[in-house]
């Protein structure tokens, strides 16, 4: 059994894999991280059966807390993607070491699923849209504010605009301030994603498979006609896959 831990800006997702199958998932808030939360999920019985613990993190502070907990309770030394475990794909960017680990493991999982050119939309705290070519190389992509960040920015950077929750607006024309904010952020985000996918597809000179993941995937994907698949746990799949590929590369033939 392997534990894959995705340490994000907002949440920490834990995936339990057995025989390459994701058996269960759990989520802990990154901002309210307490060891008692982990103790409820990562019990001694889980650790007893665990053969590997693999981390992918874009949140150094939360990562330190997770590693501290694992150091006290896990008999298995955790391995970090991009450090103890190398990224098993070409990265065609100016500074490969600066690319977010979450983006790279998403790309690994996407290409493993499609074996074709792909675009991954990860709609989380930030929205990332990245391309993978026909050879399985990471092409780069874009980073944009997520829905939550956009809503908070409007609230905190203005004197009177309220903080609103996100949902699909019934109409484009907002009839009050809350509706106008919700419509602007929602349809602005949808329009941005559609346009970027179209521009990336043109640069790639093909019609890539489009995969959507992340916390806001369920609300955004229905508005993206080119999106073929919604995979909530793509990042966990990529973490496990990077580990699996690395282990296979160390085996004698």
Image: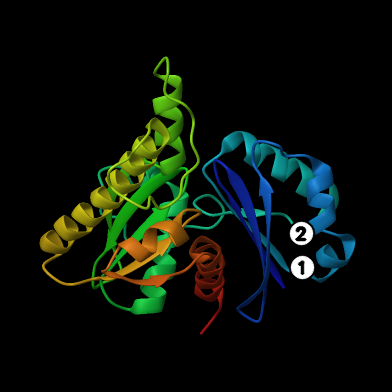
Coloring scheme used: rainbow
Q: Quadrant of residue 222?
A: bottom left
Q: Are marks 2 and 1 in contact (CB under 8 Å)?
A: yes
Q: Is residue 89 visible?
A: no
Q: Is residue 38 above or below residue 253?
A: above
Residue lying farthest to the top in this orientation: 159
Residue 76: mark: 2
Residue lying farthest to the right in this orientation: 44
For mark 2, give the secondary structure. Answer: loop
> Closest to the observer: 95 or 59?
59
Q: Quadrant of residue 17?
A: bottom right
On the picture, is 202 further left or further right than 183?
A: left
Q: Is residue 206 above or below residue 199?
A: below
Which residue lies under the disc numbered 1?
Answer: 50
Q: Quadrant of residue 236?
A: bottom right
Residue lying farthest to the front in this orientation: 175
What percent of the width, then of the height, locates residue 106? 43, 61
What percent of the width, then of the height, locates residue 162? 47, 26
Which residue is located at x 35 percent, y 78 percent?
114
On the picture, is 32 further left or further right than 196?
A: right
* Image quadrant occupied by the N terminus: bottom right
What percent of the width, then of the height, locates residue 206? 14, 71
On the picture, is 41 further left or further right than 201?
A: right
């Amino acid at each position: 059994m392997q534990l894959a831990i995705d340490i994000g800006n907002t949440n920490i997702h834990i995936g339990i894999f057995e025989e390459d199958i994701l058996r269960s998932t759990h989520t802990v808030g990154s901002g309210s991280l307490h060891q008692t939360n982990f103790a409820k999920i990562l019990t001694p019985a889980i650790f007893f059966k665990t053969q590997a613990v693999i981390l992918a993190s874009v949140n150094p502070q939360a990562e330190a807390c997770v590693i501290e907990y694992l150091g006290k309770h896990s008999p298995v030394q955790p391995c970090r993607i991009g450090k103890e475990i190398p990224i098993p794909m070409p990265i065609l960017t100016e500074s490969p070491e600066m690319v977010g680990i979450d983006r790279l493991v998403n790309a690994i999982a996407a290409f493993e699923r499609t074996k074709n050119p792909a675009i991954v939309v990860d709609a989380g705290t930030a929205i990332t849209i990245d391309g993978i070519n026909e050879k399985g190389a990471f092409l780069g992509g874009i980073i944009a504010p997520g829905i939550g960040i956009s809503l908070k920015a409007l609230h905190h950077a203005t004197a009177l605009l309220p903080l609103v929750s996100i949902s699909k607006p019934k109409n484009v024309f907002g009839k009050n301030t809350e509706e106008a904010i919700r419509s602007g952020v929602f349809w602005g985000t949808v329009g941005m994603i559609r346009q970027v996918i179209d521009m990336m597809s043109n640069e790639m000179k093909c019609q890539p498979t489009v995969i959507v993941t992340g916390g806001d995937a369920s609300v955004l994907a229905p508005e993206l006609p080119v999106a073929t698949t919604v995979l909530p746990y793509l990042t966990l799949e990529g973490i496990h896959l990077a580990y699996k590929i690395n282990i296979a590369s160390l085996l004698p033939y």
